[in-house]
Image: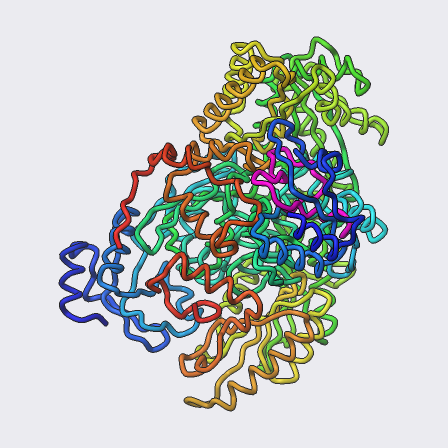
Amino acid sequence: MSGLVERLRGIVGADACLVRPEELLVYECDGLTLHRAQPTAVVLPRARDQVCRVVRACREFGVPFVPRGAGTGLSGGAVAQRGGVVIECSRMDRIIGLYPMDRYAVVEPGVVNAELSKAAAPHGLFYAPDPSSQLVCTIGGNVAENAGGPHTLKYGTTTQHVLGLELVLPDAEVVQLGSRSGFGSGYDLVGAVVGSEGTLGIVTQVTVRLEPIPERVETLLAIFPDVVSACRAVGGVIEAGLVPAALEIVDQRTIAAVEASVYAAGLPLDAGAVLLVEVDGPECALPAQVLRIREIAAASGASRVEVARDAAERQRFWRARKGAFGAMGRLAPDLYVHDAVVPRARLPEVLASILAIGDRHGLRLSNVFHAGDGNLHPNISFDRRDPDELARVLAAGSEILEVCVAAGGVITGEHGIGSEKRDFMGLVFGEADLDAMKRLRASFDPDGVCNPEKIFPSTRFCAESNPKARGYERVPFEP
Amino acid sequence: MIPLPALRALREALGPGCVREDEGTRVDGEPLAPTLRPADAEALAGALRALGRLSLACVIQGGGSRLELGNPPRGASLLLSTASLTGVDAFDASEGVCHARAGTPLAAIEALVEPGGWQLPLDPPGRSSTLGGALAAAAFGPRAQGFGRPRDCVLGLEVALADGSRTRCGGRVVKNVTGYDLNKLYTGSLGTLGVIEGAWLRLRPRPARVALLEIAPDRLAVACDGALAAARRPSARAASLHAAQKRTGERPFTVVVELAGDEASVERDAAWCESELGATPAPASALERVRERQGSTPGGGGLRFRIAGLPSQSQAMLTSLWDSGAELLAHPGLGLVYAGFALPGPEDPAAVDAAFRCTAGAAAAGGGGLVLESAPAWAKRGRDVFGDLAGALPLARELKRRFDPAGLLNPGRFAGYL
């Protein structure tokens, strides 16, 4: 591989080519610490041309390559499972153009999510998708994962906000996809690439839609005796035809962890669940919405409903939600952040099942979730050095996914499949469904060299994938 | 038209209920018969397998309201209709999602979900539009300003592939990154990668209040600025401009604005439109007329182009087209302009060339691309009606080759003659 390293150094410069084991350590995993693999090398290109040349070099030397943003992903998507070269795009971080009249921006993949909103703010605009890691995660990574966040209920996920892409294909050719208007001709290849977890090519430029900053935001915090009544309030809000920007629930165990941490938000420790509701929009529209939400919360059993009086209080409310991961992380060396989605009406029963699964396995499991989307995040604090506990964590994770799928849900809402859940794809999709996805994969990457070992079940599990998944009979292929 | 032995084989394999020998149609002048009308999704997959065995290619039809969209079919001999796959099988009013089969008319879905407090975020022209057809064509109407693109409401799809395999993608939940987002690939692919059997849709809350307004400025620039400003109001669901070339008794420029949402927002935006733009209440039929115009051509047999550019360039696009004598409809907030050209007589290629030249000029001015949505078959010859896919063409070809290697589904009709 020394020939390859020499080539890579020649392309990106010695300072942007990492090969020493201690330098590669950080690239062994992403936010999912359980799946680890060391790449042969990491390159940090500064321009598209360098990406093309790196890809060409990888092809010549027959090694796979893996795109990476800030490495905050939670499904092992940015890990070089089969070795090879990690192409980290964080140094391609220019905002190439910002067009307030037409509300869009053209950016390089390494632009940090929150930085884009900051740059757009003077024009009265912002970039809507806001994953929890938005202070560090990059737009390129967001595109790969179709990142969501607490405000997707109203604004949608990344895919609704990407108009165009520049992509370096696995054969090192460059292709421009989409259009600035969002109404281009031909197959919607932008839609196919967003959320493809870096398996179809390497994004080197993104055209994103920007949204007008809402005139006003109101944040409510409602305290409930239990999670079932909090879920009832969520259902009530949706049924009333309201579309809040966020509808988030924090369960009792998370409240306890948050209040014992630096993120303490002054929540009552005897609360069964906390519901955070954020509405935004025209100034004139919000008082009626706030009133309606207060009524619905009260009718659903809330013991207290507070409306943030100022920005500081709004931040305190959000601390209860956003501090959850940090607070849970205090409890043990490792934190497994799960991600699954169920139809909203099934939330109470699914939550009860999840807590029971955690208890049965003797695990520290708590829930914070995007209730409006039915997007659950069961968190398990654990110590991966304890093989027995690790085995219980994995067993519980698998049972949780089964419960969610049985309730009509899916196995990931925003973290992606990556290497983490590839062997659970058979829970949701049958062979014919996966085969259709493989046709897309092969159209872009016929040799399977771009981020291999992701999304599709490993061979061992492939044969076990359920042909009757989602109730379909196996359909024989007739040539 | 297909040879008699093939017809017999189809009849034998699919039954006379599915093979309608007395039903046929012409698409871009090509006679297509019989019509296959499978009764359910399993029969649809069976029909595709039979077509594969007999090497027969088909044109796919939903409600038939958009058959004129596309390049002339290449080698298709019969019609495959999804019209019998009807019904809304699930509607969850607490969640705002529903599942309908491909042949269900959009109107039937609307009628079912609206009493439950929801609206279907699809309003393409064409009263007979079916769900499958609308999604396959990614068809939208003036309310796209508020609804967004058709792809945005698709949560999951069931699709029969050309080899007869029945597949699913997405799901019924509103947030989902489980596997590739094939919903996006199939939506707008004009049936060339597979035939949509049914779809899970995300509905939108029915607004508490709707207001319809109109403006009748005397200059195109004022009309365009007005429509764009109205489109930027938070409650704007539609803001469209119509420009008719000097017909007697008709005002040359009309802007129709639909506001929808909560009481307070709609009231405030309506007051703003009245004071700033001189808007007045419009008759309830005003938006339907916009929709009809978006889907029609001058004189019924002319050309209709769709030009997609940047909103800020709408005026430049409109101005350059206006001088060429085109009839115009625009959604300036979306950067979309529809230009209609009457054709003087039979087969006048020079008139078509001239229309292409000036729409291409407008598209260049608008920073976008164009699609010839409707035209007589002869006028489509020698040009891809979807414009040039440029660098994306090799990928598109590869997709078509892998999803439909024998070219059975709408062959030749899509962008890049795929």
x, y percent for residue A243: 63, 38
- Look at 17% across and 65% down and name the residue there: B7
Describe residue B204's horizontal placement relative to residue B406 as left or right: right
Residue B69: which quarter of the image? bottom left
- What are the residue bounds of the magenta stretch? A66-92
x, y percent for residue A286: 74, 37
- Look at 38% across and 49% down and name the residue there: B159
Whether A267 is drawn above or below A429: the answer is above
Q: Is residue B132 visible?
A: yes
Describe residue A380's horizontal placement relative to residue A10 as left or right: left
Whether B271 is drawn above or below A310: the answer is below
- Look at 67% across and 80% down and name the residue there: B320
Whether A347 is drawn above or below B301: the answer is above
x, y percent for residue B178: 51, 38
Q: Which residue is at the front of the view, B278 or A328?
A: A328
Residue B54: which quarter of the image? bottom left
Residue A154 covered by magenta stretch: no
Q: Which residue is at the front of the view, B327 or A264?
A: A264
Q: Could you tell me which quadrant the N terminus of chain B lies in?
A: bottom left
Residue A72 covered by magenta stretch: yes
Q: Is residue A100 visible?
A: no
Q: Which residue is at the front of the view, B227 or B403?
A: B403
Whether A91 is drawn above or below A254: the answer is below
Describe residue B217's horizontal placement relative to residue B197 as left or right: right
Q: How is the image coloured?
A: rainbow
Q: Which residue is at the front of the view, A371 or A460?
A: A460
- Look at 50% across and 42% down and name the residue there: B179
> Of helix, strand and loop, which mostly describes the magenta segment?
loop
x, y percent for residue A193: 57, 51
Q: Could you tell me which quadrant the C terminus of chain B lies in?
A: bottom left
